[in-house]
Image (cartoon, rainbow, N blue to C red):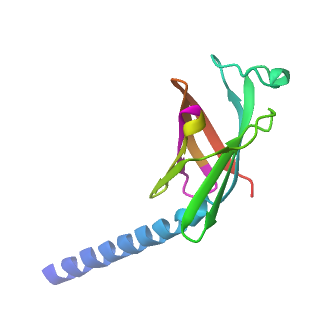
């Protein structure tokens, strides 16, 4: 009787480990690669002086993350402005979380992939502000 409980326990443990290994593979570093776009992001106390007046205090944010060999690169911009792309100066990936550092604006975006690996939920921290930004994978 004890041996059947032990066997059941180890079978359940093996199934759980198998599930974790599949999930970890699905949200691997490669799953961050692509074009990510936000909806309208509210900048309540930060109003860009760039050509964004038509949307008032709202901007769309886009990230493009690419991979060459085993190295990720990323850039960010708002399609609502005439600003050029900002290149990420450093990228950290840990599990299903990514951190994109933009030294040009003293900022960092921290996002976490959802289970389907098609949405990043996180925030952009810069100029002493934390701006929640949810990104959808569009490519």
Percent coordinates x, y for residue 40 in the rendering? 73, 32
Residue situated furthest left in the rendering: 2
Quadrant location of residue 39?
top right
> Left of 2 or right of it: where is 95?
right
Q: How many marks?
A: 0
For this orientation, the residue located farthest to the top is: 45
Look at 58% across and 71% down and name the residue there.
69
Above or below, 109 against 66 in this view is above
For the N terminus, the image quarter is bottom left
Confirm whether the magenta stretch covers residue 90: no
| Residue depicted at x 62% and y 64% | 67
Q: Where is residue 83 drawn, in percent x and y? A: 76, 35
Please indicate, yes or no, whether residue 116 appears anywhere in the rendered image: no
- In the displayed structure, 54 sits above or below 85; it is above
Vertical position of residue 43 compared to residue 112: above or below: above
Q: Quadrant of residue 21?
A: bottom left
86 lies left or right of 112 = right
- Residue 42 percent across, percent down from the top left: 67, 25
Q: Is residue 59 visible?
A: yes
Which residue lies at the image location 51% right of the left edge and 23% below the top edge?
128
Depth check, front residue: 82 or 62: 82
Residue sitting at 74 percent across and 58 percent down? 139
Q: Position of residue 94 (x, y in %)?
A: 43, 56
- Is residue 117 one of those drawn in magenta? yes
Please give the range of residues in magenta. 105-119
Q: Is residue 23 left or right of residue 58?
A: left
Using the image as rendered, state which of residue 34 and residue 66 is in the foreground.
66
Residue 28 lies, with reference to residue 35, above or below; the image says below
Residue 65 found in image quarter: bottom right
């Amino acid at each position: 009787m004890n041996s059947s409980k032990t066997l059941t326990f180890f079978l359940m443990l093996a199934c759980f480990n198998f599930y974790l290994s599949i999930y970890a593979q699905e949200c691997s570093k490669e799953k961050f690669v692509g074009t990510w776009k936000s909806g309208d992001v509210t900048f309540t106390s930060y109003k860009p002086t760039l050509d964004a007046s038509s949307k008032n205090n709202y901007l769309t944010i886009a990230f493009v993350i690419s991979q060459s060999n085993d190295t990720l690169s990323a850039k960010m911009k708002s399609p609502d402005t005439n600003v050029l792309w900002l290149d990420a100066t450093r990228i950290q990936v840990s599990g299903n979380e990514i951190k994109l550092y933009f030294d040009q604006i003293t900022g960092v975006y921290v996002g976490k992939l959802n289970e389907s690996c098609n949405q990043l939920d996180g925030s952009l921290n810069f100029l002493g502000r934390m701006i929640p930004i949810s990104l959808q994978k569009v490519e």
